[in-house]
Image: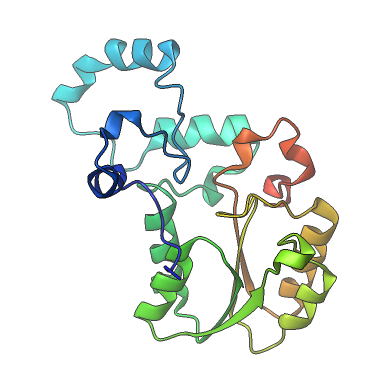
């Protein structure tokens, strides 16, 4: 069985299958399959003049906009070049000795942790349990757990963890001085994201 890997390589797939890459709709990446919205194209066109200057290295306008939209203090916002960079930065900063992941999940958590030779404990998502996370996940978090990574909705299963369980996980991590990284990269695809997000807990 092939190991699950992050997507975004339609070219290898097209080459392997002998088809045109433009005929592939890639659902393995959080890219809009409907294309770029007209409002984004307009904003891009209207900002072309700004390309003659280096961008603000402190991201002041971006941070201010995110802070206002998400109602989160600017002190807690760190822009990055996608989730992968943020994941690697977090791991390099914390240097966790022991980590907890679900399996399967987004592969970048494991890759980042392996660079530091972190000891990884896995909570296996089972097909006969619909790949869901249950309260027994809490039993995997203890005083030796330095960091917990959780993807909600999970990539690649798409399964959601409800807010009640998320809060229990957050509280257990807080009790054990464990860092809790909740990756909500795909949360905007939900119409009721407030039932599955912990942004208001920041």
Residue 124 in the image: x percent, y percent? 66, 74
Q: Which image quarter: residue 179?
A: bottom right
* Residue 112 vertical position relative to residue 43 in the rendered view, above or below: below
* Count of marks placed on residues: 0
Q: How is the rendered protein coloured?
A: rainbow
* Residue 176 vertical position relative to residue 15 in the rendered view, above or below: below
| Image-based side of 49 in relation to 124, left or right | left
What residue is rendered at 49% in x and 33% in y? 64
* Residue 136 vertical position relative to residue 131 in the rendered view, above or below: below
The extreme left residue here reads 52
Residue 58 in the image: x percent, y percent? 34, 42
* Residue 144 vertical position relative to residue 35 in the rendered view, above or below: below
| Image-based side of 108 in relation to 58, left or right | right
| Image-based side of 199 in relation to 58, left or right | right
What residue is rendered at 60% in x and 30% in y? 69
Q: Which image quarter is the N terminus in?
A: bottom left
Q: Nearer the viewer, residue 124 or 194?
A: 124
Residue 38 in the image: x percent, y percent? 42, 11
Q: Nearer the viewer, residue 92 or 2?
A: 2
What residue is rendered at 84% in x and 70% in y? 135
| Image-based side of 28 in relation to 150, left or right | left
What residue is rendered at 44% in x and 79% in y? 95
Residue 41 in the image: x percent, y percent? 35, 14
């Amino acid at each position: 069985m092939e190991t699950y890997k992050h997507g975004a390589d339609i070219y290898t797939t097209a080459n392997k299958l002998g088809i045109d890459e433009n005929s592939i709709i890639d659902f393995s990446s959080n890219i809009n399959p409907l294309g770029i919205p007209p409002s984004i194209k307009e904003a891009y066109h209207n900002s072309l003049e700004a390309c003659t200057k280096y961008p603000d290295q402190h991201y002041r306008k971006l941070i201010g906009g995110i802070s206002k939209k998400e109602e989160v203090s600017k002190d807690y916002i760190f822009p990055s070049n996608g989730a992968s960079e943020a994941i690697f930065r977090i791991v390099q900063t914390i240097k966790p000795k022991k980590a907890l992941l679900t399996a399967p999940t987004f592969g970048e958590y494991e890759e980042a942790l392996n660079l530091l030779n972190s000891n990884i404990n896995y909570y296996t998502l089972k097909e006969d349990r619909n790949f869901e996370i249950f309260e027994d996940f809490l039993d995997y978090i203890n005083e030796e757990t330095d960091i917990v990574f959780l993807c909600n909705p999970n990539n690649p299963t798409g399964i959601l963890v409800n807010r009640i369980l998320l809060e229990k996980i957050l509280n257990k991590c807080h009790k054990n001085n464990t860092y809790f990284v909740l990756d909500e990269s795909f949360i905007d695809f939900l119409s009721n994201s407030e039932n599955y997000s912990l942004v208001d807990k920041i």
